[in-house]
Image (cartoon, rainbow, N blue to C red):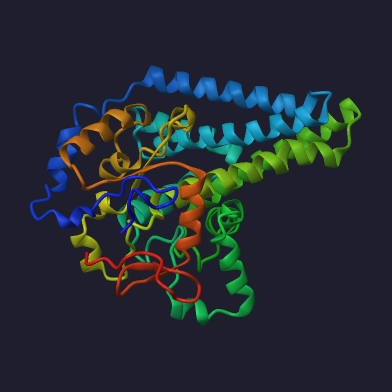
Amino acid sequence: MMTLSSPGIGLAAAPAAAAPTFPHRKLIRAWLVPIATRNTAYALWLTAIDLALYALTMGTAIFASNALVQVLAALACGFVIGRLFVLGHDACHQSFTPHRRLNRWLGRLVFLPSLTPYSLWEIGHNVVHHGYTNLKGFDFVWEPLSLEEYQALPAGRQLLERIYRSGWAPWLYYLVEVWWTRMFFPSRRAMPTRRNVFLWDCALVSVAAVVWIGALVAAAAATGQSVWWLLTVGFVVPFVFWNGMIGFVVYAHHTHTDIAWYDEKSAWSAAHPFVSTTVHLTFRSFMGAALHHIMVHTAHHVDMSVPLYRLKAAQALLEERLPGCIVVQPFSWAWYADTARRCKLYDFKLRRWTDFAGRPTSEPRTV
């Protein structure tokens, strides 16, 4: 187990399943009912702010006269795309406003800058990820390989896995393994279920991409800038930054030396996965609020109906009533680097992380 003396590591919590009288999920969710109230006016205000920030940062990336300012604005725009995505994530959970139809349309609107098809994200995230968090064969995001699975891969795919897990490439992982493979006109292998709404949502983000790129080409002609330069700062940089941001976020949510993965549904179910498989990543700066509190993640998995603007209160209540059952990790780059170094492959029998040679990098878990 990690200790307080471990480099870059904060206080590690024992797994929820260790508590023999762990409350039923229905009771825990009942605790949150008074908190999980949704406010339409506030949700619309948050949407308006982030859309304005998107217009400001994108406009600066296009029209600023200094190349460095354009690049910085492009990076900021990628961050704002991430903020808009978090709003869409809440809307997709029907937790943003009390109105289901409004949530669906707001979700589609704020998902457009990230080119995320609403209905496909809804299935992959709400049904698969939340329904089977950290259960191998079901939850596919950052699903670790066993040593045997890794060794059976061709050399090129082994190299790609090493790149993904290096700590430097969350952008590549999300771009290839999630967005391209499962979100943008996915194959039958990636998405066996076929629905008309999937096609329409993919078409919608395709139109958005064409309009986005076309507007950049027109802006280049109007301002006398290089088309390739404007496509770089106006499209490539924001989109790659956004992919890196979401790739990091979902990695940090469920990858930790005190977080287990399971390959047996019975063991997974007994471990209270709605609590034990998530990390609450804390910040000493404004970053938690800047990310719309998406890293306050345990409360979100306990009850998806808690809106992002109530998550801090819900998380505080859970940590008060479930002491020692929630992994709370203060963020530092040292912690992230240590986690990326340790969490390469997973030994599902002993439930511990290993490196690519199969050497253990965390203590075995009994639950």
User: Residue sitting at 60 percent across and 43 percent down?
Assistant: 205
Q: Spot the residue most to the front.
A: 5
Quarter that holds the N terminus = bottom left
Task: Report the side of 226 relative to 331 (left or right).
Answer: right
On the question of residue 197 being in view, the answer is: no
Q: Position of residue 234 (x, y in %)?
A: 74, 36
- Residue 318 lies, in percent from the top left, at 21, 37
Residue shown at 41% from the left, 29% from the top? 102
Question: Is residue 113 at least partly visible in the picture?
Answer: yes
Q: Is residue 257 above or below residue 53?
A: below
Quarter of image, res 235: top right
Residue 245, image quadrant: top right
Residue 61 picture location, percent across and down: 74, 29
- Front residue of this view, candidates 4 and 262: 4
Residue 134 appears left or right of 120: left
Which corner quadrant holds the C terminus?
A: bottom left
Q: Quadrant of residue 256?
A: bottom left
Compared with 225, 273 (above or below) is: below
